[in-house]
Image (tube, grey):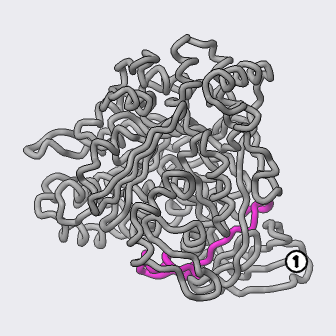
């Protein structure tokens, strides 16, 4: 089957294209050069904008805490029911949508991939069943390490870096993961011993390991294994006024190794002013701009009802009294980590919430290189992912941004530099941040661009002045060359793939890990492992090579380039 998309205005940063009119050819789901043969189908785009399918690198869409969130906020599904049409009678939801609603709402916005950033090894089998149940999307998960007793025992006894790397590699194989995540390193384990705060250089109870030692060991293992994605780090002291100092020290804790700091907005708070809460965004952006091995996603706050779901039990226990409605849940997971879930409403007239909103936008606009900052709301923690079109408009339209600022808490303009930031994102920068850069940092070489060999994930937009309307409802979305969305509505349901890495390791480590499981866990290591036949109904995962992180070099003009 040969499909021709005629006269597309292509925005593809990988090929250096910014609106050039070209024809696209897709043969059997893969983009090809003009074959010089008569296509089976021709769709005229008439100069409409074509981008690769968008990719969300950090969205909580599967796993135990997501199901708890669905249970804890049942009114979310009453207020946002699923479509009654044939495509999605799916149970609905907005802050914590069902798996079916998740896939439908992503694809209706032109996203063809989204990645779960916090999968526990003990919950991997369940997480993969949920990922498989999400239609349309390519996906995968990041394995959470750094609070599990297996890894902390290695740090306590100063294990050889090779043994640590081999253990991490085995865990990636066993859990069928794409990357490694650490959440408040050591802090979740310390919470189990009744610690309610653990600073970067404070030894935790029992294992006597500081968060700095843990993150450095993990960052080294990820680097030595050649994983495409650097250590995906949720740092210490999330949400605490003054945590900008911890964040800056944490960046140094990577000791020059590649590092990805996630939902950085929640880690960019100062403690200045009469409210003892201020923006540290300018300081964080300055460091990001000067550190090429550092990437971040923002975790933008948007206003309205959501639910926070995190493995960071310390932060969630601290915030439990702030929930709306007033309900919350926290759990410890034996030998692994934990989670906390709290419904939350961000209010535009709240000074703190309004400043959080401004801090996220400051970060987006002050970090110069769009290849190293990623569009996220930390769904659902900062806001549901369905808010992305409005967020894109805020980044692209200064007048809209400043008008929104004026309607927020009256003290906010005195505490943010947003009105003075003239930058507006271009369509090319949006294509970098939501397509090319996510694919590159995850090692998905055949996604995020529209060159020959790329999968036929293509989103087509009308060039509307209202960028929110434009990105909320694409004209056409193709998944693997199949038309699945027309005029913002699903017309056909297809399935995606699960993406994993398989780094090499010394098989000797299997005996050590088996002995650990026999001694401490109560389940055999061989039963802990998720087999290929358990992925995608037996189809198995897509395996990506471990050849190290992509090199990102920012040119002198700061626009960012691979």
Q: Nearer the viewer, residue 65 or 223?
A: 65
Residue 486 x, y percent position in the rendering: 63, 85
Q: Which residue is mark 1?
A: 1
Q: Which residues are magenta?
A: 451-475
Task: Find the residue positioned furthest to the left.
Answer: 274
Instruction: Give residue 104's quadrant in the image.
Output: bottom right
Crowdedness of circle 1 by 10 Å Cα count: few (<14), some, many (20+)? few
Q: How many marks?
A: 1
Q: Residue at x 86, y 77 (%)?
A: 2
- In the rendered structure, the answer to whether residue 421 lies left or right of residue 444 reads left
Badge 1 marks a residue whose secondary structure is loop
Instruction: Give residue 515's quadrant in the image.
Output: top right
Residue 473 x, y percent position in the rendering: 52, 80
Q: Residue at x 44, y 29 (%)?
A: 189
Residue 72 x, y percent position in the rendering: 40, 61
Q: Nearer the viewer, residue 485 or 515?
A: 515
Residue 414 x, y percent position in the rendering: 13, 55
- In the rendered structure, the answer to whether residue 42 lies left or right of residue 515 reads right
Q: Residue at x 39, y 55 (%)?
A: 381
Q: Residue at x 29, y 52 (%)?
A: 359
Residue 458 lies in the magenta-colored region: yes
Q: Main secondary structure of the magenta part?
A: loop
**Whether residue 439 is situated above or below residue 43 in the rendered picture:** above
- In the rendered structure, the answer to whether residue 323 lies left or right of residue 451 reads left
**Whether residue 36 is situated above or below residue 221 in the rendered picture:** below
Q: Nearer the viewer, residue 326 or 469?
A: 326
Residue 427 seen in the figure:
yes
Task: Find the residue positioned furthest to the right.
Answer: 37
Instruction: Give residue 272's quadrant in the image.
Output: top left
Residue 26 lies in the magenta-colored region: no
Can you say which quadrant of the picture contains the N terminus? bottom right
Q: Nearer the viewer, residue 387 or 346?
A: 346
């Amino acid at each position: 089957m040969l499909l021709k998309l005629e006269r597309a205005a292509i925005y593809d940063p990988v090929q250096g294209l910014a609106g050039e009119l070209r024809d696209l050819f897709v043969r059997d789901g893969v983009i090809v050069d003009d074959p010089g043969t008569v296509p089976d189908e021709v769709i005229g785009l008439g100069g409409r904008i074509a981008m690769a399918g968008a990719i969300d690198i950090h969205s909580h869409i599967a796993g135990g805490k997501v199901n708890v969130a669905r249970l804890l906020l049942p009114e979310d599904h009453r207020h946002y029911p699923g479509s009654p049409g044939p495509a999605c009678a799916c149970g609905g939801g907005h802050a914590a949508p069902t798996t079916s609603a998740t896939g439908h709402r992503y694809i209706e916005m032109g996203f063809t991939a989204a990645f779960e950033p916090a999968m526990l090894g003990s919950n991997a089998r369940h997480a993969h069943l949920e990922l498989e149940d999400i239609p349309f999307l390519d996906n995968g998960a990041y394995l959470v390490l750094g609070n599990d007793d297996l890894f902390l025992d290695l740090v306590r006894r100063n294990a050889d870096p090779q043994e640590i790397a081999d253990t991490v590699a085995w865990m990636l194989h066993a859990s069928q993961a794409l990357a490694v995540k650490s959440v408040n390193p050591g802090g979740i384990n310390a919470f189990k011993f009744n610690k309610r705060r653990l600073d970067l250089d404070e030894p935790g109870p029992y294992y006597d390991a500081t968060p700095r030692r843990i993150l450095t060991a993990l960052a080294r293992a990820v680097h030595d294994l050649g994983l495409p994605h650097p250590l995906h780090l949720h740092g210490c002291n999330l949400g605490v006024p003054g945590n900008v100092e911890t964040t800056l020290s944490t960046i140094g804790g990577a000791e020059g190794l590649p590092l990805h700091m996630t939902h950085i907005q929640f880690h960019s708070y100062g403690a200045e002013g009469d409210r003892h809460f201020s923006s540290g965004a300018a300081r964080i952006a300055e460091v990001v701009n000067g550190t090429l091995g550092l990437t971040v996603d923002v975790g933008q706050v948007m206003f309205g009802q959501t639910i926070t779901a995190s493995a960071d039990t310390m932060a969630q226990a601290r915030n439990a009294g702030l929930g709306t409605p007033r309900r919350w849940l926290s759990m410890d997971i034996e030998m692994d980590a934990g989670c906390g879930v709290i419904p939350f409403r961000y209010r535009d007239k709240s000074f703190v919430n309004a400043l959080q909103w401004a801090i996220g936008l400051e970060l987006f606009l002050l970090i110069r290189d769009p290849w190293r900052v990623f569009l996220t709301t930390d769904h659902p923690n900062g806001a549901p992912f369905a808010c992305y079109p409005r967020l894109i408009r805020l980044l692209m339209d200064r007048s809209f941004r400043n008008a929104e600022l004026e309607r927020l808490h009256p003290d906010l303009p005195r505490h943010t530099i947003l009105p003075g930031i003239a930058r507006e994102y271009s369509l090319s920068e949006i294509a970098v941040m939501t397509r090319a850069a996510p694919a590159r940092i995850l090692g998905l070489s055949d996604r995020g661009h529209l060159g020959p060999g790329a999968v036929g994930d293509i989103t087509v937009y009308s060039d509307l002045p209202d960028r929110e309307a434009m990105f909320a409802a694409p004209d056409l979305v193709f998944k693997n060359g199949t038309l699945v969305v027309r005029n913002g509505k699903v017309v056909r349901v297809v399935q995606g793939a699960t993406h994993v890495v398989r780094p090499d390791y010394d098989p000797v480590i299997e005996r050590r890990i088996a002995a650990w499981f026999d001694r401490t866990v109560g389940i055999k290591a061989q039963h802990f492992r998720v087999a290929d036949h358990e992925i995608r109904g037996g189809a198995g995962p897509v395996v990506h090579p471990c050849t190290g992180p992509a090199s990102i070099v920012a040119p002198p003009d700061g626009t960012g380039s691979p």
